[in-house]
Amino acid sequence: MSDVVTRLDVFKTYKLFVGGKFPRSESGRVYEVTDAKGQWLANAPLGTRKDTRDAVLAARAAVKGWSGTTAYNRGQVLYRVAEMLQGRREQFTAEVAAAEGLGAKKAAALVDQAIDRWVWYAGWTDKVSQIAGAANPVAGPFFNLSVPEPTGVVGIVAPQAGHGHSFLGLVSVLAPVIATGNTAVVAVAADAPLPALSLGEVLATSDVPGGVVNLVSGRTADLAPTLASHQDVNALDLAGAIAGEGPGAAASLEALAADTLKRVLRPAVDPSAQDWTLAPGTDRLLSFLETKTVWHPMGQ
């Protein structure tokens, strides 16, 4: 008699990440995610407009606490994300390789860059005010100080797999948003959602308060217009928006955002040419900051 025991495969159930929890889509629907060769990988939750609105509600509730946290503490939290991601490096390497159709070595290099990017932005949390703020010379016995403040809730259309490396791109657009005290609602890459949804598990165990980051998978054409038109979203990053016309296209999303006077960060002219492996610089850190100017009389 054979001692070999045949086990059933235990497939991972991917869920949304909203408000620090892992709900299924309110519709209960899923969609198939395949690799570069068309082979089935998993079912991802098919997020809806209702899921997106719920995510915005969670993000708004988290704004006060997260923006009021000291910059030093935010840096510690982002560094903790890097620590936890490093501990799950093999898992993310496998997921990125499958999502992007890459070899293990190339995928591992991209995951390492994503980890390094969290560390890089963690170091900027308590320094960005030094490059975005100023003491302004004025005619009179006053101090005049310009101080950067977070914009609030930022909607992000994450880079798609067809536009480059979706996981590194996601980290590259998400980390600077929360590093500066904003909260985020992310429409993750529709064609490569699995690494992004797994990132939610990392964030949940990295001291990131619930609602600071919310990850919704589904059809970009459904999710992005909801973010662009939502009155409680203060800014919009269209890194993964497509060119041309249609519900998920950059031009139509900008038009929707204009109705509520959102700050909009436009995508690259050719998103497919965007190289997320390049050094990020400080542009995205500064893109979602407002400037408050304070006057104070000088003492005698």
Image: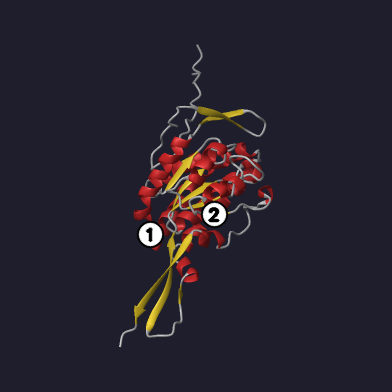
Secondary element at image label 1: helix
Most extreme residue toward the front is 259
The residue wearing badge 1 is 73
Q: Please name whichever residue, 92 or 177, is drawn nearer the observer in this view of the structure.
A: 177
Q: Amino acid at mark 1?
A: Asn
> Would residue 64 be seen by someone viewing this image from the given angle?
yes
Q: Position of residue 72 (x, y in %)?
A: 39, 62
Identify the residue at horizontal 67%, vertical 31% (top origin). Answer: 37
Which labelled disc corresponds to residue 257? none
| Mark 2 or mark 1: whose residue is earlier in sequence | 1
Apparent side of residue 27 relative to residue 267 in the rendered image (left or right): left
Q: Position of residue 189 (x, y in %)?
A: 57, 41
Question: How many other residues sit within 10 Å of disc 2, few (<14), some (14-19) or many (≥20)?
Answer: many
Which labelled disc corresponds to residue 264? 2
Identify the residue at horizontal 67%, vertical 52% (top origin). Answer: 269
State the CA–CA distance, disc 2 to disc 1. Answer: 28 Å
Secondary element at image label 2: strand
The image quarter in which residue 28 lies:
top left
> Would residue 16 be seen by someone viewing this image from the given angle?
no
